[in-house]
Amino acid sequence: MELTNNLNNNWRKVATAIYRKPTDSKIFGNVEIDVTRLEEFISEKRKSGLKITMTHIMVLTVARAIKQEVPELNTYVKRGNIVLRDHVDATVSVLLKGGQMGSVTIKDADTLTLEELVSVMGEEIKKSRQGSENQTMQSKNILASMPWPFRNWLFRLYKLATIDWGLSLPFLNLSSDSFGSFLISNIGSLGLDMGFPSLLPSSNVSFVLIMGGINKKPAVVNDKIVSRRILSLGATLDHRVVDASHGGKLFRYIKYMVKNPGELEVKAKFTA
């Protein structure tokens, strides 16, 4: 009975209602990035008292990339049109009590410094683990509480109203933009080296980024083969709103910031 209950947790109940066989066009991509120097930067900051992780670096880097280099990634489909968001909000997957996955949303992530992001994200994760539910978690728990097949019908109605028709339902705390600009998940912390995420049908994000494991691998540096620390990144993009070229711009910006993490310590200067 205990195993059955674990298998049929809230997320599993929701997943059986919302996922179908793949029919949509998606773009998958992955890169491997040398983070040897970046890990040294993180170690130095942690020694000085700033408890940053690789996840903090990637969240802020991606948010600034969207604002500065790839605004096309900050779009979604609404009533047949591509809509550009006014803000860059990041949704980050977190591990909750009991091994279940949840998420926190960082508003206007692109405007923060690294120190500010650590503070804001830490507070959001703390509230989430203490049982304070954000809009996404509330919706998931409501859906999970419905018996089959009613949760299936309810999800279809929710998706039709918010995702397909672009309506907001403030009395139910639901909208067509509940997940922010992008989703990011660190599966490397769970022991997985690489992964390709799904585009959640109940979200309007144009892409999801997966952080894989960091492993020692041979690399060519100054024409010599040396051991380096390599991070695997995987992404899935919504081909309705973006192309592979946008993913390329994102990964190029990430590679640049990995070599220049100090820029994340100051406010970004965005041009109009």
Image: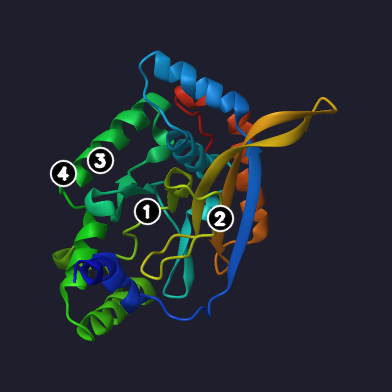
Sequence order check: which comes first, mark 4 or mark 2? Answer: 4
- Which numbered marker is on residue 124? 3
Residue at point 54%, 26% (across, down): 39
Which residue corresponds to mark 4?
130
Labels 2 and 1 touching (C-beta < 8 A):
no
Point out which mark residue 235 bears: 2
Q: What label sits on residue 267 in the rendered view? A: none
Residue displayed at 38% across by 64% down? 203
**Which numbered circle lies on residue 180?**
1
146 over 59 or under it: above or below: below
Q: Would you say 184 lies left or right of 41 here? A: left
Q: Amino acid at mark 4?
A: Gln
Q: Evaluate if marks 3 and 2 touch, with contact meaning CB atoms under 8 Å apart.
A: no
Circles 3 and 4: CB distance less than 8 Å? Answer: no
Furthest-top residue in view?
48
Q: Mark 1 or mark 3: which comes first in sequence?
A: 3
Depth check: give the residue in front, 101 or 255. 101
Please report whichever mark, 3 or 2, sits nearer to the chain's N-terminal start.
3
